[in-house]
Image: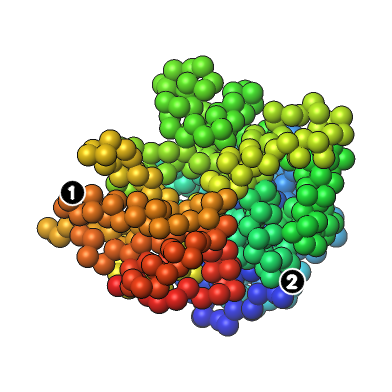
Amino acid sequence: MQGRAMPGKPSRVFDRGAEWDGLTAFVGRSLPHAMLGIVSGRRRMGKTYLLRALVERHGGFYFGATAGTEAESLRQFSAALAEHVGSPVAFSFGTWDDAISYLFGLADPGTRDVSGGSAPEAPFLVVIDEFPYLAKVAPELPSLIQREIDRFQVRESRMRLLLCGSAMSVMGGLLASTAPLRGRAQLELVVRPFGYRAAADFWGVAGEPALAARLHAIVGGTPAYRRQFLADDVPTSLGDLDDWICRTVLSPFSPLFREARYLLAEEADIRDTALYHSVLAAVAQGNTTRGGIAGYIGRKAVDISHPLNVLEDSHLLARESDVFRAGKSQYRITEPLINFYEAVMRPSWARLESGQAAEVWGQAAERFAAQVAGPHFEAVCREYVLGPGRSLLSASLGEVGSGVVTDSKARQQIQIDVAAVESGSGGSRSSVALLGEAKWGTVMGVGHLDRLGRARELLAGRGMDTASCGLACFSAAGFTDALRAEAERRGDVLLIGLDELYGRVAPAGILP
């Protein structure tokens, strides 16, 4: 097969440029053998929308599986395949073995795509969406696909097969350990939520960073929440946000009201949802270590290993290592709507169901700031350093994370919310490019900068290279005049507020 120019991304597909490029490169790769790709991502991310657009652009066969028995699923697949090839009568495969064999036969270089009339050498794109539904009722499917992939590694084939699914633990298991398809995939794509800047553009609130930051702390970057769930009901201004929250997220008549519960219930490996909600509630309440979570829910630390692993595999919880202390880590809820539910909604669920949204929200300001907006703002600041703010650092970026620096002399611990650390190798010392503190509701002053400076001294005393380490204050509430004057006087300080985070104002200078 010869390389061909690949069609561009449809204008109706918002953002997703990197995902589109990865998918089109997979389809258009000129290898004369069968290729397999795995596409995953939690529900509502727009995977189906993206893959349907891909099939429309490239031609091919799309099948969206539904929950059903094995016989019904095979019958639906057979009917869809018959329609694709233009058969006047439905196919009647006796087994999935027959169906998969026939499907791969259509990718034979000598077989013309009857439905589309494409040239014999053109790639034959096949998308099987919600594959976990099929694998549940026909567990032999991964092995059957593995057999055909292996068979068409020694014979020519135009097959470009994409298996897609929302059950993250199931999709991750397709290529894990001793799974039949391990080592067979040439693409593994996870469709993630929009980043905070893209989400602001998608919701049409990029011009008002204070609104965009609060909105993202509640609904994150999930595309479906604006269009499918809320029919484009978007807060028009920061002053409209409270009313919008009450009529959407906190309203028992809104699809978003129970969405956090559904996200948890949809994961195949989650059985005891009460236990998992308790784990998430513990994290939302600020108990972010394994021991803290176990203590909050009244279990031993060893007893919560499985729930933590499942929540990580489901991409609902992330374990983030302390960049300064080996073996230390903290957990963070990755889905903002779940964090908002656990911190604000779940404690007042009965009142919300009875229509007391305005009262509940009016009493939740402190909880929202401390348990939702604050931790979310810290994560956004780290995302900024990894992305738009990367050019501010003249030194190597290294690992971006958070950590704690212990000050034994003062008997205190200094929390570093944003750190860029480069591990040493080949005899070189570990180096620190950036130390930052993030505050959601606090106007930052010189005292915050002094604390960061002390942390830099302590790290240098531990043997880390801090010669090019800059200090950054991130604040959604602003900075004192004294801090601004100090930052202007020095050459190693960055002050980054919401305008800088959202690209409305460019931070001054590049750190040494």
* Residue type beneath disc 1: Arg
Position in image of residue 146 (x %, y %): 50, 48
Closer-to-camera residue (429/222): 429
Position in image of residue 455 (x %, y %): 29, 51
Residue at image coords 33%, 71%? 490
Q: Quadrant of the C terminus?
A: bottom left
Residue at image coords 38%, 39%? 329
Question: In the rendered view, would you say 19 is above or below 373?
Answer: below
Position in image of residue 266 (x %, y %): 67, 37
* Residue 423 visible from this viewpoint: no
Direction bottom: furthest residue: 5
The picture quadrant where one finds residue 500 is bottom right
**Residue 54 tag number:** none
How crowded pointer 2 is (Cα within 10 Å; few <14, some 14-19, many 20+) is rated as few
Direction left: furthest residue: 427
Q: Earlier in the sequence, mark 2 or mark 1?
A: 2
Q: Which residue is mark 2?
A: 12
Question: In the rendered view, would you say 97 is above or below 106?
Answer: above
Say what secondary structure mark 1 lies in: loop
Answer yes or no: do the residues labelled 2 and 1 have beta carbons within 8 Å? no
Closer-to-camera residue (161/412): 412
Q: Which residue is mark 1?
A: 462
Residue at image coords 41%, 21%? 302
Name the mark nearer the viewer: 2 or 1. 1
Say what secondary structure mark 2 lies in: loop
Question: In the rendered view, would you say 70 is above or below 112?
Answer: above
Closer-to-camera residue (437/397): 437
Task: State the separation of the CA atoms marked 2 and 1.
Answer: 53 Å
The picture quadrant where one finds residue 469 is bottom left
Q: Is residue 81 left or right of residue 221?
A: right
